[in-house]
């Protein structure tokens, strides 16, 4: 082990590395080809990763996380990639683009309801930004949310959403104001909300084991 390596990866990193490597070898590699062909992996794997503390790495303890440096997260990704499936890694990791806005800006009640169960692996979270009419033009998104008393009425659609077909909740970019980036807000929308539906998982040239979907409001 070089001095440069030791500077970044210490004993705690190597303990985590060995733990994940064992999970991949025993619990993922024997099944990964079947999961790739199926276009998804078992939901139970989220719970396994949550119980082992992998999903919470880098998040504050008050939301159920395991504080640590960026190299702990690097170890997780490096070792999961030994499965040979970037789709599996993307699917398991969809929480890392879905819950950070809630962790940073959410209320205590929102964190209790929408962050802790995801970190425990009990629920799947996705980020919904991309729309059929404009992938990289986020400032031009068209999905609109209009306040109606204690609720919002949302109209529009999203596409290419990682974990979109089976997400229990999405952190969804919607237009609540005028044109441009300053008119955009995030809503947390649960998949059992009336008027919420998903299309079939999209077929892709890669990342087969990652369910990628359209969502309609």
Image: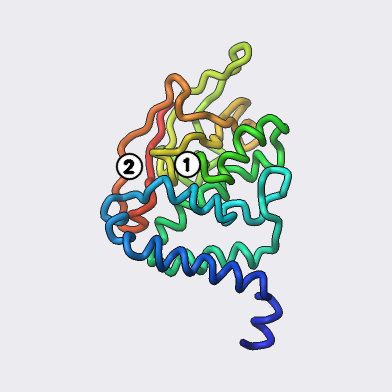
Which residue is at a point 51% across and 68% down the rendered structure image? 78
Mark 1 or 2, nearer chain start: 1
- Residue hosting label 1: 130
Residue on which the image places disc 2: 201
Residue 129 visible: no
201 above or below 57? above
Against 117, residue 70 (above or below) is: below
Give the structural element (helix, strand or loop) at label 2: loop
The reply, left or right, for residue 58 in relation to residue 155 is right
Identify the residue at horizontal 66%, vertical 63% (top origin): 70
Coloring applied to the structure: rainbow
**Relative to 96, 203 lies left or right:** left
Query: Of circles 1 and 2, which is in front?
Result: 2
Q: Is residue 10 visible?
A: yes
Using residue 68 as the reference point, say whether residue 217 is left or right of it: left
Residue 121 is marked as none
Where residue 143 appears, as percent x and y from the top left, is 49, 29
Q: Residue at coordinates 43% horizontally, 69% vertically from top-left?
A: 82
Quadrant in the picture for the N terminus: bottom right
Question: Which residue is rendered at x = 41% and y = 68% of the image?
Answer: 25
């Amino acid at each position: 082990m070089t001095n440069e390596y030791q500077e970044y990866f210490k004993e705690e990193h190597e303990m985590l590395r060995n733990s994940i490597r064992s999970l991949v070898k025993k619990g993922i590699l024997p099944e990964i080809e079947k999961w790739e062909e199926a276009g998804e992996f078992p939901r139970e794997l989220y719970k396994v990763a949550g119980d082992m503390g992998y999903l919470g790495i880098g998040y504050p303890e008050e939301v159920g996380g395991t504080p640590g440096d960026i190299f702990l997260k690097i170890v997780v990704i490096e070792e999961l990639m030994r499965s040979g499936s970037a789709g599996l890694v993307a699917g398991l990791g969809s929480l890392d683009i879905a819950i950070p806005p809630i962790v940073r800006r959410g209320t205590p009640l929102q964190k209790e309801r929408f962050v802790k169960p995801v970190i425990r692996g009990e629920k799947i979270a996705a980020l919904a930004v991309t729309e059929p009419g404009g992938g990289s033009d986020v400032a031009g998104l068209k999905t609109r949310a209009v306040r109606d008393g204690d609720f919002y009425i949302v109209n529009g659609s999203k596409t290419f959403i990682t974990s979109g077909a089976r997400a229990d909740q999405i952190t969804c970019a919607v237009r609540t104001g005028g044109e441009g980036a300053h008119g955009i807000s995030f809503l947390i929308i649960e998949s059992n909300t009336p008027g919420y539906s998903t299309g079939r998982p999209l077929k892709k040239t890669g990342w087969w084991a990652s369910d990628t979907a359209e969502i309609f409001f």
